[in-house]
Image: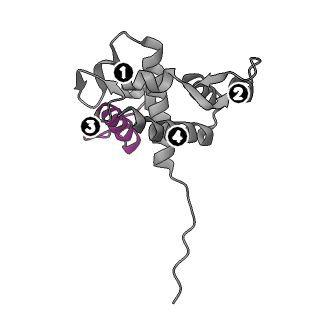
């Protein structure tokens, strides 16, 4: 008897996770080093809790992405406000180093800029992928940077 065939549907939860990480890092980078309240709905979009006060799975996944970023030492925050926000959030040293550094695999001319041969900053590549709406490129960048950041441990 043969194995049942599985049609790949994509890992939408990983796409959303990478998008949440990128948005969070970008928001905190723009405000760095100021500590700020970071609302889940600013990252995942608006959410209406159900009749029991429970948020959608998408909203909860975004909140948990913020917790993961803290547990993995990419961001720091003082406390949570229910599941709505995190207080006094900022990039950690590891998070700032990760996104403010240059991507040695991509030069500025590869990223549609005129200064040929110079490495591109990671934050600029992430921002461009988000502006272009290129979720595959964004996922590739975030996963590559997170895997390489193990060198910072």
Q: CA distance from mark 4 to mark 1?
A: 19 Å
SS for tag 2? helix
Q: CA distance from mark 4 to mark 2?
A: 17 Å
Quarter of the figure with residue 110: top right
Tell me the residue that label 1 is attached to. 93
Rendering coords of residue 11 (x, y %): 50, 52
Task: Give 23 or 99, whichever is nearer the viewer.
Answer: 99
| Residue drawn at x 56%, y 58% as measured from the top left | 9
Quarter of the figure with residue 43: top left
SS for tag 3? loop
Q: CA distance from mark 3 to mark 4?
A: 37 Å
Label 2 neighbourhood size at 10 Å, few (<14), some (14-19), many (20+)? some
Quarter of the figure with residue 127: top right
Rendering coords of residue 28 (x, y %): 42, 19
Relative to residue 149, is residue 126 drawn left or right?
right
SS for tag 1? helix
Tell me the residue that label 4 is attached to. 144
The residue lying furthest to the bottom in this view is 1
Task: Give 52 or 56, whichever is nearer the viewer.
Answer: 56
Tell me the residue that label 2 is attached to. 111
The boundaries of the magenta stretch are 47-70
Rendering coords of residue 131 (x, y %): 63, 26
Relative to residue 55, is residue 10 drawn left or right?
right
Q: CA distance from mark 2 to mark 1?
A: 26 Å
Height in image: 97 above or below 148? Answer: above
Q: CA distance from mark 2 to mark 3?
A: 44 Å
Residue 53 badge: 3
């Amino acid at each position: 008897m043969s194995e049942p065939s599985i049609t790949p549907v994509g890992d939408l939860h990983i796409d959303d996770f990478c998008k949440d990480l990128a948005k969070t890092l970008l928001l905190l980078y723009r405000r760095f080093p100021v500590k700020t309240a970071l609302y889940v709905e600013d990252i995942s979009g608006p959410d209406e809790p159900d009749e029991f006060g429970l948020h959608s799975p998408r909203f909860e996944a975004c909140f948990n992405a913020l917790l993961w970023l803290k547990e993995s030492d990419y961001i720091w925050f003082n406390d949570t406000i229910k599941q709505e926000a995190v207080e006094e959030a900022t990039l950690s040293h590891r998070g700032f180093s990760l996104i403010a550094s240059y991507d040695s695999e991509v030069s500025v001319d590869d990223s549609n800029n005129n200064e040929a041969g110079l490495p591109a900053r990671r934050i600029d590549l992430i921002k461009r992928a988000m502006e272009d709406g290129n979720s595959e490129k964004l996922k590739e960048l975030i996963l590559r940077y997170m895997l390489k950041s193990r060198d910072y441990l």
